[in-house]
Amino acid sequence: MDRARPTRPPIGRIAAVVFFAVTLGVASMGGVAAMVGASVIGSLSNGLPDPTSLASLDFAQPTIVYDRTGKVELARFEREKRRVVTFDEVPRLVLDTTTAAEDRTFWQNDGFDLGAIVAAAYQNVTGESSGERGASTITQQLVRARLLPPEVTQSNDRYLRKVLELLQASRLTAAFPGEAGKEQIITAYVNEIYYGHQAFGIAAAAQVYFGVTDLAKLTPAQAALLAGLPKAPSTYDPYRYAIKATDGRLVVPMDAPPVVRRDYVLRGMTSSRWTHLTPDQLAAALAEPVVLAGEKPMKLRAGHFSWAVHAELEQLLGGAEAVETGGYRVITTLDWDAQQLAERYAEAAALIPNLPAKEAAREMDRLKLGRPDRRWINNLRGKDLHDAALVALDYRTGDVLAYVGSAGYDRLDLANRRFQPQFDAAAAPRQPGSAFKPVVYATAFDKRVLTPGSLLLDISTNFGGGWTPKDADRLERGPVRVRQALQLSLNLPAIRVLQRVGNEAVADTAHRLGIEFLNGRDAFLQSGLAGAIGTVETTPIDLTSAFGSFPNGGVHVPTRMILSITAPNGTVTYEAPKPQGKQAVSPEAAYLVTDILAGNTDMSQNPFWASTLALRNGPGGKRRPAAVKTGTADNNMDFGAYGFLAPPKDKSAPGLAVGIWMGNSDHSAPRTNDPPTSLEAAGEVWHAFVREYSRKWPLADFARPGDIVRATIDRWSGGRPGPWSHGTVREWFINGTQPGAKHGVDPAGLLYSQGCGTWQVDPVKAELGPARWDDDVAAWVARARRGTGIRGPYGSITAYWFGERSWGGPLAGPCSKPKDPGSGGKDNCKQCPPPPPQGTPPPQPAQPPPQPRLRRRL
């Protein structure tokens, strides 16, 4: 019974509040009473914020991210939905509905309304309702929200809070007197107050409820409904009562609480300062249906890029709170046209092949994909690849032009373990596979260890600890030159390159190129020779940026995503500095890598790759010079393609580098007996994107540095031609490293030794790695003497280089073994005379002195 009895209001405390309000009023009248009142007020004012701080009041606003033009909004990062407006942006209609709802004496009162306070006190004592009107003025509500210390707002003593609220409202009005002061106060109020449904401030409320972005376009009925919401935002939230009409509109019933409250405000506007509705206008406003704009969830454009920008903003602005409340305008590097193309092809490659056939056809129609694209997309059906990432950047400035972390950021309907659309694979460590090889070769060129004409061995070998890797096609081609090995992405020669140049040197080059390895530099150093074939994980964006250094004269420019940040007051708080690159590799080494990789888009050099990668989008179908390298990781978990176009003559035009990753989000390998190659997967995406993005660009070619020279070399051994030569080729060199130069790298006749009265191909002599590798090389020679197609102990089979019918001449071996396939099926010699002593040259005067075998690293 006692618990059911209503609690009696504390009449003494209520009276104290009323007394204080009267005291405030008296204090403004002068005389002795005023002096007493002022004394009381002064003692209570201690500890309250200075009311003049209203002039510097700021509001939590969203930070808005734009593309590089500043016209395409990509994202809004916010903790509160708010758009701050000035007094001039608030129509008089909105001012009148606001005062009609909350404070009808606003323009005349001293920050509080004594009559309303007395009425509220009477209500508390008697329990009678005073209607829709509350006791707190607009000024009091603003004070309560922003101009009282936390210990007051969080106090359990509601009557003390009310006293201090009245006091601060009075002080605020005194600090901002007259019409101008009232304008400042009501402007702060309509920006600060909560209107429900996550909308703070009148501008956000107008957009959330009615989709109106210009307050001048609000109808009287709409303005009145908004003005009525702050009294009880949750209770009056129109979305709580909305019903979907047959025409699809969201309509609030006319007897719903927010509409009843709206009507109260409309009827109270008879004494408004500016707005005077005629009876007919009032009737029309009361009859106007409340139609809501509908829920519009935040949708990011370029989602992965936008969140990457958010991370950078946290570093620049000092944390997430500053980003999400600071109201900044951010101009990024993103090219919206490039981004749309990137999203189109990432989705086409990773999502469409995994849809049912009819749905896939509809999606290709929606994306407006032509027949050439449909062919390679259909070829990916059944390959069990579910995700893709794409990065496009301007290697001259480091600007990220397009950034797709996963195919279809918003395609949560297709999400599963292998496709996680909001995971950013572009910034996630992945094995680059053979796409890392250009870094290894560039290091070797700069260290003067190799040239594009140097001889390497494509022979399966136990490189140590039982590690016996193979080429992707499981072939062993024997002697090959560097250009051939890198163009065709052969693993076995690349491993030999790393053995010669060393992990330390390659790690240094990778660092200068902006490549960061998972678990740091030590991870690469500890990877041993396996690092040559891209087993150490790095991110696709880092690798794309590194590739951009090759056409840029070896200069690496770090990536950037933000061009400028502007504060709400118009002050530019950050402007990206002028791009500053650093020399990562020499211009000459960069050119040699570029020239080799450019062959992958030239049918005359590498028809296998160029049939996919050649760009014929120049004027009249001319070929556009481009350089590309693909890469496949261990167990087919990652598929990549990285490449670039030549720098345009126009210095302000972007130099384009593009990187593609394909695979599965969970790092699983395709569950198929017929996995794709990187060329069929990532290579096709690279080609399609670059083809469309650069279609209208003028053609440009790669320029050779002045210190690059051309020389004629032996077709097989790479050094100066001699009597052993079975053909010659022309090759580019860093000046001074070509055959015959003082610091020439490639010994003449390295592949050959004399035997059976002739020059024989001797790969064991050409093996410059540890001596323990010789047995495997000798075993290959023995197999190769039996012909092509002979399988070795590590699973690879002997093969000629494409289009060739020998390995450069008869293979070395006992004279009793005839029919060397390299001699066209004829005996090596008929009488088998003893070979001449090593170092004894044949009588030809043009023959260079024989080269001793180089000492090898153990």
Image (cartoon, helix red, strand yellow):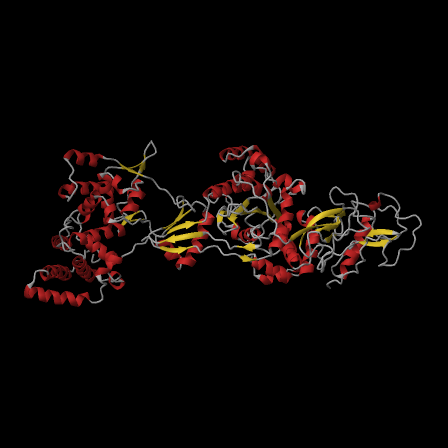
Q: Is residue 281 above or below residue 97?
A: above
Q: Quadrant of the C terminus?
A: bottom right
Q: Position of residue 557 (x, y in %)?
A: 52, 54
Extreme residue toward the right, this view: 831
- Residue 264 at what x, y percent from top left? 18, 42
- Which residue is nearer to you in this view: 671 or 665? 665
Identified at 66% across, 47% down, the residue is 487
In the figure, residue 227 lies in which quadrant?
top left
Q: Vertically, is 713 above or below 219? A: below
Relative side of 90 to 585, left or right: left
Quadrant (top left/top right/bottom left/bottom right) for the N terminus:
bottom left
Where is 477 relative to 287, above or below? below
- Residue 214 or residue 464, whichever sits in front: 214
Question: Camera-side residue: 373 or 297?
Answer: 373
Instruction: Answer with the quarter of the image where residue 466 lies.
Output: bottom right
Q: Position of residue 478 (x, y in %)?
A: 76, 50
Position of 821 with respect to 337 (left or right) is: right
Residue 744 appears at what percent x and percent y? 71, 57
Q: Is residue 374 visible?
A: no
Residue 715 in the image: above or below residue 42: above
Residue 509 visible within the image: yes
Q: How many marks?
A: 0
View extreme (left): residue: 31
Q: Is residue 355 left or right of residue 672?
A: left
